[in-house]
Image (tube, grey):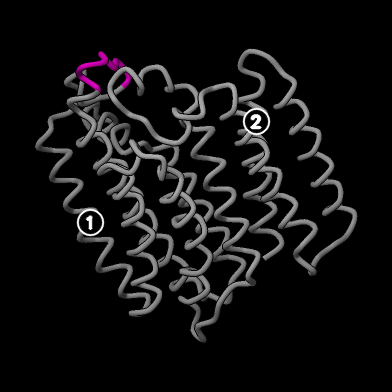
Amino acid sequence: MNRRVTALLQAAHLGPTLAVTLVAAGLAASADLTLPRGLLVVAAVLSGQLSIGWSNDLIDLPRDLQSGRADKPLTTGDVDVRLVLLACRGAVLATVVLSLACGWLPGLVHLAVVSAGWAYNLGLKSTPWSWLPYAVAFGGLPVFVFLAQPTPGLPPWWAPVAGALLGVGAHLVNVLPDLADDEATGVRGLPHRLGARWTGPLATLLLVLASVVVTVVAPENRGPLTWATLAVVLGLGVVSLLGTGRTPFRAAIAIALVDVLALTWVL
């Protein structure tokens, strides 16, 4: 692949972008969507996540240059600012068109989800409310998918609740490795105010709560696999709380992955 294209994709935070898109694909498969409709939903989510990723690196460029981030293509010069800006604008346009093509109501919900990500990039990340965009985005995703069905409906109430818990937990886990760099450049979100000592345990608690909501509160599909899933999550939670070094971080990531699989499976 062309080096510039690779750098452009890296600037979009490709890992999280694809992860959220795969979650949307799983939710679409669980909902009553035709294949073309499901692909439209997934395309809307992908374009929205690309716009959030690119805008994040564009907005953070001065801060990344100050902290000497060698892992950001814009700071290393591997990709031109104008190219990323052009790609971001194209992604925003595609997001609006694809979202509204799903219907005006689901389209507006998805645009609210994407707007939450942009609000985080534009300043909420440096406030005690840094968790809110993640709660809105992850909680709103199942609502968007279910409203996009041929006969629009709402997901079970516990789905957006579990999504919101998962989103906030993911936010805390995602920020953990960068706490020192962020604080050095003036970012003071909720995790920075809590500090590493409390951020990790709180992230674990929220992710385990998301698992409990999906496996225990959800009345459908209870069975041996459900309880086995909960047992695995509780075990990982203990590892996350008592482990040392990178182990708690890795355990929390594993809980988040199990939560995503459980959510899409139960729905």
> Under tag 2, what secondary structure?
helix
Location of residue 62 in the rendering, given as x and y in whole percent from the top left corner: 17, 25
Determine whether, in the image, residue 67 is placed left or right of residue 182. left
Near mark 1 (Cα within 10 A), the count class, few <14, some 14-19 or many ≥20, is many
Pick the quarter of the image with the C terminus: bottom right
User: Which amino acid lies under the numbered mark 2 shown in the image of this protein?
Assistant: Pro
- Whether tag 2 and tag 1 are in contact, CB under 8 A, the answer is no
Mark number displayed over residue 62: none
Residue 108 lies in quadrant? bottom left
Residue for point 66% across, 57% down:
263
Circle 1 residue = 92
| The residue stretch that appears in magenta | 64-71
Residue 187 lies in quadrant? top left
Residue for point 16% across, 51% down:
89
Residue 26 lies in quadrant? bottom right
Instruction: Identify which residue, 243 or 197, lies in the foreground.
Output: 197
Circle 2 residue = 201
Residue for point 79% across, 69% down:
220
Location of residue 41 in the rendering, given as x and y in whole percent from the top left corner: 42, 66
Q: Which mark is first along the chain, 1 or 2?
A: 1
